[in-house]
Image (spheres, rainbow, N blue to C red):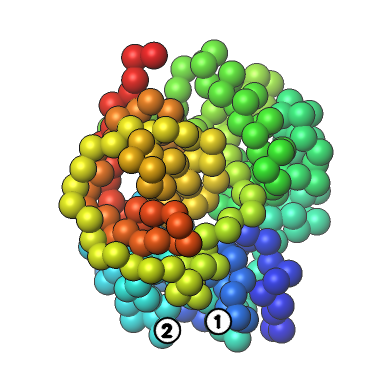
């Protein structure tokens, strides 16, 4: 199929000859860049999903040491400089489901319309991604949706935070709280939002328009501002004047101003005058919430 990368919105689901990827964070010089969400499972491997007549292993939650062997065989995909950020050649794409595919929107019209009204955003600001593309939510599975646009994302997050404060949190099988999933009175299941707005850093990273400074030592810093921590990549301003730029999905909306972060050794770079600490793989960050 002929695919114009610029026509595919972030969080669309893209099937290539090599695997399924959430595409793209951005389009750059004719290629899409995004996270590898699934890879095809071999007969001897446990699968997390089945669709498009194949069994799939979900990679988004895997540590890099487990993720890398699954994707390193895919031609021109893995770039050590970019960590988990993968390059997708449009020539390899065999199937695309946009987040605002008319059929998907029609199937989930009631849920999306209810969400739009509750969040105070237009229906056109919402899209569907993740497993909701190929299976209905049930039990503890999620309804995965994305909110586009900075203004709509901020107003939607304010409503979601009120819901999170008023209801019991979603807990994973090991008992840990998942910080972003929420429930809506009158709607079935759990809702997993993502927020997307213009990202000024990813294109610079892909173009090499930065000055690498090597890997910094581990350190402890305080979050000075979490204003842009909701987006992907997440951007947190730190007390030492640096920025934490994280491509780890779980870091979105995770930290708050005043939180004390214990950072592992991270690659550092200067983007113009801004010192940036980069999370490109799956580095774990311990944090302590401020009592205030």
Task: Tally the marks.
Answer: 2
Q: Position of residue 155 (x, y in %)?
A: 68, 30
User: In which quadrant will I find the N terminus?
Assistant: bottom right
Q: Residue 39 falls in which quadrant of the image?
A: bottom left
Q: Position of residue 245 (x, y in %)?
A: 42, 51
Relative to 216, is 28 above or below? below
Name the residue at 77% across, 49% down.
105
Residue at the disc numbered 2: 76
Name the residue at 66% across, 69% down.
96
- Is residue 139 visible to the viewer in this orientation of the structure? no
Q: Position of residue 228 (x, y in %)?
A: 54, 41
Q: Position of residue 282 (x, y in %)?
A: 31, 54
Left or right of residue 286, residue 106 in this image: right
Left or right of residue 242, residue 166 in this image: right
Q: Residue 186 falls in which quadrant of the image?
A: top right
Mark 2 lies on a secondary structure that is: loop
Q: Residue 200 falls in which quadrant of the image?
A: bottom right
- Is residue 68 visible to the viewer in this orientation of the structure? yes
Between the C-alphas of marks 1 and 2, the distance is 9 Å
Name the residue at 40% across, 61% down.
270
Find out whether the residues at labels 1 and 2 contact each other: C-beta distance under 8 Å.
Answer: yes
Mark 1 lies on a secondary structure that is: loop
Left or right of residue 238, residue 182 in this image: right
Q: Closest to the observer: 2 or 140? A: 2
Which residue extends farthest left?
Answer: 217
Specify the label residue 89 is tagged with: 1
């Amino acid at each position: 199929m002929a695919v114009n990368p610029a026509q595919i919105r972030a969080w669309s689901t893209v099937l290539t000859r090599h695997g399924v990827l959430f595409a793209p964070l951005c389009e750059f010089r004719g290629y899409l860049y995004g996270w590898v969400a699934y890879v095809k499972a071999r007969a001897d491997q446990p699968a997390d999903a089945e669709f498009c007549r194949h069994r799939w292993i979900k990679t988004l939650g895997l540590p890099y040491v487990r993720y890398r062997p699954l994707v390193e065989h895919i031609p021109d995909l893995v770039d050590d400089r970019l960590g988990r950020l993968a390059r997708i050649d449009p020539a390899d794409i065999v199937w695309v489901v946009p987040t605002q595919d008319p059929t998907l929107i029609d199937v989930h019209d009631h849920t999306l319309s209810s969400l739009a009204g509750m969040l105070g955003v237009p229906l056109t600001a919402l899209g569907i991604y993740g497993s909701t593309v190929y299976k209905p939510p049930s039990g503890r599975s999620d309804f995965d949706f994305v909110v586009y646009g900075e203004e709509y994302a901020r107003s939607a997050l304010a409503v979601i935070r009120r819901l999170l404060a008023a209801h019991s949190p979603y807990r994973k099988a090991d008992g840990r709280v998942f910080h972003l999933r929420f429930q809506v009175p009158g709607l079935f299941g759990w809702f997993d939002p993502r927020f997307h707005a213009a990202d000024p850093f990813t294109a610079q990273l892909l173009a090499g328009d930065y000055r690498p400074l090597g890997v910094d030592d581990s350190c402890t810093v305080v979050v000075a501002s979490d204003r842009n921590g909701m987006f992907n990549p997440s951007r947190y301003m730190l007390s030492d004047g640096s920025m934490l730029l994280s491509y780890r999905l779980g870091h979105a909306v995770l930290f708050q101003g005043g939180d004390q972060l214990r950072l592992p050794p991270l690659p550092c770079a200067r983007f113009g005058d801004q010192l940036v600490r980069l999370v490109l793989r799956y580095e774990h960050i311990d944090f302590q919430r401020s009592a205030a």
